[in-house]
Image (tube, rainbow, N blue to C red):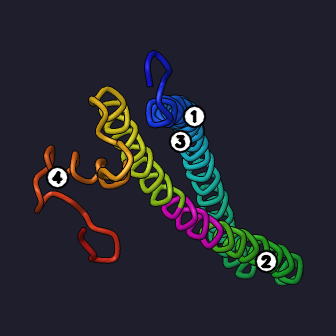
Amino acid sequence: GDGEPSTTDGGAAASVARLAQLFTELRGAARMEAEEAAEARRAHASFGREAHEAIAHLEATVERHRSAAFEAQESQSEVIATRDSDTAALQDEMSMLRSIADQATTEASALRSKLSAQIHASRELDERLMEAERDLEDAREAAALDEELLHEPDLEVEGAIPMAYLRVIRQVDISGWEGIEWQRGYTL
């Protein structure tokens, strides 16, 4: 009418306000996902260093025990040649050292298995992180398109093109038809 806003103008203003609100929410979510991704990277790096240090320590321990066992064997041979009475004591010591070396080897093997599982889990986390970063980038691109569409002159009028289609048309304008990745292979 004369001087009063039409329902179409009110609907467009409400749509613009809702899009602005959604854009703000998307920015907040993107910021949170970026912070979570950075924290995951820091945790992954710290875990890798600790695991490698633990394995190096265990390998050094195993090597020390093996060396001790070898030295005990050499000592045992010399003592047997000169003193038969000390043979039983040396064999007990040798057995104990072998047991310690076997235990250290078992522990090192268990740690290697655990590290392998954690590395696998870390790789899965990296893949999920990369997927989240791609989703974040897609969300940023969609938000940028929405921001551009907010400034377009009254394209969404009653009976005109819906906003969802306008976004797709805008992406085709920017990326070209071949540059669009269609959901489930379906196009417009």
Say what secondary structure mark 4 lies in.
helix
Name which of mark 2 and mark 1 comes first in the sequence.
Answer: 1
Would you name the residue on which mark 1 appears? 25
Residue at 35% over, 42% down? 157
- Is residue 164 at all visible to an observer of this figure? yes
- Residue 37 numbered tag: 3
Q: CA distance from mark 4 to mark 2?
A: 70 Å
Name which of mark 3 and mark 2 comes first in the sequence.
Answer: 3
Would you name the residue on which mark 4 appears? 172
Q: What x and y, as percent, mark residue 29?
A: 57, 38
**Residue in front for this viewpoint, 152 or 107:** 152
Q: What x and y, as percent, mark residue 34?
A: 51, 36
Q: CA distance from mark 1 to mark 4?
A: 25 Å
- Position of the N terminus, as image quadrant, is top left
Q: What residue span does the magenta drawing correspond to?
A: 113-124
Asked whether the beta carbons under mark 1 and mark 4 sit within 8 Å of each other, the answer is no
Would you name the residue on which mark 2 appears? 99
Label 4 crowd bin: few (<14), some (14–19), many (20+), radius 10 Å? some
Q: In the displayed structure, does residue 173 sit left or right of residue 118? A: left
Residue at 62% over, 71% down? 70
Q: Amino acid at mark 2?
A: Ser
Q: CA distance from mark 4 to mark 3?
A: 30 Å
Was residue 127 drawn as part of the magenta stretch in this picture? Answer: no
Name which of mark 4 and mark 3 comes first in the sequence.
Answer: 3
Q: For the residues carrying marks 4 and 2, which lies nearer the camera in this image?
A: 4
**Residue in front for this viewpoint, 29 or 47:** 29
Asked whether the beta carbons under mark 4 and mark 3 sit within 8 Å of each other, the answer is no
Q: For the residues carrying marks 4 and 3, which lies nearer the camera in this image?
A: 4
The correct choice, above or below, for 3 with respect to 163 in the image is above
Q: For the residues carrying marks 2 and 1, which lies nearer the camera in this image?
A: 1
- Position of the C terminus, as image quadrant, is bottom left
